[in-house]
Every structure is written in C-alpha cells, then in structure tokens.
Image: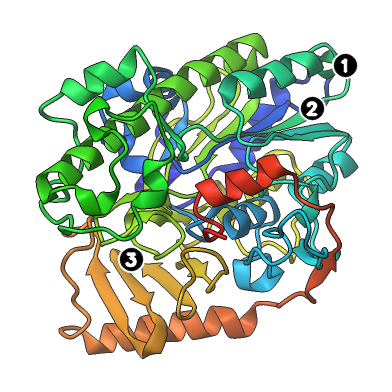
Amino acid sequence: MTHPKSLGIRGAAWFLAAVVLSGCAQEAKKRPDVVVIVVDTLRMDRLPFLGGARDRAPFLAELADRSLVFENAWSPSSWTLPATVSVLTSVHPFQHGVENLEGLELGPDDEPIPVNCIPGEVETLAETLKHAGYRTFGIASNVLVGSAVGFDRGFDRFVMLEDEDADVVNAQVERWREEMRAEEPFFLYVHYFDPHDTFHAREPWFQRFAAEKESGWPDGALEEVPDTYTDLDWILTRLEPGPDWLGERRAADLSADELRRLLAWMRAAYDSEIAFVDTRIRELYTRLELDESIVFFLADHGEEFYEHGDLTHGQNLYAETVRVPLLLHLPGESALRGRVTAHVTTLDVVPTLRGLLQLPPSIQDQGQDLLAPGPVQPVFSFLAGKSGQHALAGDLASVVVGDHRLIALDGGRVELYDLATDPLERDDLSAELPELVAELLQELDRVQASSRAYPRATRLPEPPSETMLEHLRGIGYLGDE
C-alpha cells in the first residue's frame, strides 16, 4: 500500500488507527504491543533500505520491505544524551536541558554534584504508555541512558548495562519474556550500543567487508582525510583486536597512507558491528513474535569518519551525524507501508504513537503525528557546547525547510546546503542565497522563542563505577585525566 506522504500529505491516520486497533479486537489485548528499537551511533547510509549494501543488515532490509521507511529522518542532536531524551519526550534539547555531562564525569574520589535530568513537568513515553495501561520494560546498553538522568521514569522494569553488546541485551529481554506475555499489552524500549566505538572486528563479516574494493562509503571522503590527526590516539586504544600492522604505534607515528588505511579498517569494523546487531534484532523480533506489534526502529544519531574533519560524533551537526534511519512497522496485512520522502524528525515518534493508539494529544509534543493530515514542518537539530574531550566553542543549530538545510555555527557563521543536489553537504551556498539564509535563521529564532523551556531539573547521582568511568573515557566523553 502506498504511504500518503508519497503524495505530499500526511493523511489517512483515521484509517490506519482503525486497521491497527481492529486487528486486535478479537484478542484479549485492547491495544497492540509497542516496541521502540534504538541502535546507537548508526548512520542511515550504511543500511540497505537507505543506500547501503544489503549484506550490512539483511534483516532490517526485510523489515523495511514491510514497513514505512522515512528516507529523510533527522535526529534532534548528534550525541546520545540530548537526542534520546528528545526522542522519548518529543521536546527539543534546549527545552529539556539535558545537554551536558556535568555530574556524570566524576572520578571515584570526587564529591558528587547534581546531574541534569528530565524535568518533572515533561512526561516520558514510558509514563504515557503506563498511564494507558501498558506494562513497561526498558533496557539500554549505554551508560548515559540511565536512572541518573531519569530514563527509568515510567518503566516497570528498567536495566542499564555498561557498554555491553547485543547478546547481553537480548539475554535480559529473554528474562522478561514470560512476564511480557500477560493479558495487558507491553511497551518495550531496547537501546543497542554495538556500532558505537569500541570498534570490534566482528566475524564473519569483517574480513569480507575489509576486502571489498567498493564499500559504498561516500565518494571522496578518504581523499579528504587530513594528513595528521590529534584525536585518533584515544581511538587507537579502542580497537578490538585492531589491525596487526598497527602494533603499539600512535597516530603521530603513522604516514598519511597508513592513517587512511586505518580509517578503512575502522569503517569495515563499524560495518561488521552493524551486521552483528542486525542478527540480534532478528533474534529479538522472532523470539517476541513482533509481527502483530507496532515497532519503531531508529538511531539516536550517526557517526562521522572525517567527512567534515572530525571523528565519531557530538562535535557538529552535519548529515552523517544527525541524519538517521527511521522505520515504522505496523500490524496487519493491510497496514500502510512504503517510502516517505518528506523530511521528518525522531521527535515525531511519541505523537505518532499517540495517534496510532488513540491517546489524547499533548501540548508538550514538538514533533508531529507522521500519519495525520497537515503540511510538512521545518525539522530542527541542536548541539550545546558539552563538557568532555570534544567541547564546543558555542552552541550549534540546524533547520531543514524543503530541500535546504542551514547550520548555524558559533560566532554568527552559517552554512547552507541543497540536500537534493548535495546530500553530502560539501557545497556551502550561504553566500549565494542570503535571503534564504535570513529566512531559515528566522525559523531557528521562532522555534526557540515559541517553545517552552522547562525549569532545569537535577538529581544527585550515585558515584560512578570504574566501569562507567572507563566507558566514558573510551567513547570520548571524558578527557585523559
């Protein structure tokens, strides 16, 4: 069935809700189960339904074939903490204020200081569904997605793992499986960590990907890698097992060719992590028999491999770090499926679920019901200068209107890109189109002036474990001290 947005509108929500709910009318459950699967640090262009090779994620390719695929989805931010809070609340990062690591980056002997957490006035998705009669389960394999910042609110069962892989995540879900078979519907939030560094060379995929002459990475990115790197040394300690030829050398010891060779190794390892987690998502999907469930699949943010001069994420708002996969699987043979080309945001997850489950709308929601009538709205991303290794000089913001995307940098600088002709964001058009720049800057001013900024909330966390400290150092959220 063709999705209504392929016709330029968001219609047929009433029809879709009727299909979803009528499919459950003969069952004891009044509403379908809801599952939100997040894969950390997953670039959209590595997935087969968004331009990548099918062998990177064959199960997700199959799931996409029977789902709605949003080809142009954007994250609210380029790192986990603000992006994931926004996904689960449908409010912008500057509204909820959970945008820094203060209080999470303490040493074992430091005095605890308060941590920014989700404001009490902001309702989370788990709280919404719990109030609607769902039993709620959440598991996250990222130390930032934990109780310290309020991610556990609304969950009957919540487990935060410290940098564990998808096997450990699935094992925890398996422990809950019988409990999830109760009469009441369940909501399950699963946050996989695997494509995030540490970079593991997962077999049998890594050797095949490393040997490919055409890996499908963006053209020209390897040639644009600078000759020297200052931020690779901490990554070199996070390669498991790492290329044999590297040995104990540091980045400064490598030639430009060797650095490019190392970058190719990391890309192959990254792809192998995607293939690995794809097999575990298939396992989860099969074990829980999710064909009759509502399933949202997305990433919190992407990853950069020097396309714009940086490595990893959280330093900028270019497409490789904030353009993300988003698909929606709906139960029933007649459920909507197909491709959606309009630009959307992961802020849309919560209001879309409200519409599907016939829950009342909320003035809190800054996203939109993806299936409801109405014009396509501007899409925003934000990045505040966070503490840690990759501290920013100032705040960044971006907006997408039509095919154009503006990035507002610190110091009043701006960049403008035409996504239709330049999806890799290489050709800055800001000097050529000053009137459009002014118009898009007004959109950024409007959303920040008109959106409620909630009172900042804090809580005193438990002292971090040594495992958490090592994790935060390794993923670049702490310095070397």
- Mark 1 to mark 3 CA distance (whole Å): 45 Å
Q: Is residue 441 left or right of residue 144?
A: left
**Which residue is pictured at 30% across the width and 37% down the height?**
266
**Which residue is pictured at 59% across the width and 44% down the height?**
471
Secondary structure beneath dot 2 equals strand
When asked about the image quadrant of residue 46, the answer is top left
- Mark 1 to mark 2 CA distance (whole Å): 8 Å
Return the residue nearer the eye: 208 or 397: 208
What amino acid does circle 2 point to? Phe
Q: Which mark is residue 320?
A: none
Circle 1/circle 2 CB separation < 8 Å: yes
- Mark 2 to mark 3 CA distance (whole Å): 37 Å
| Residue occupied by mark 1 | 182
Return the residue nearer the eye: 116 or 241: 241
| Residue occupied by mark 3 | 402
What amino acid does circle 3 point to? Gly
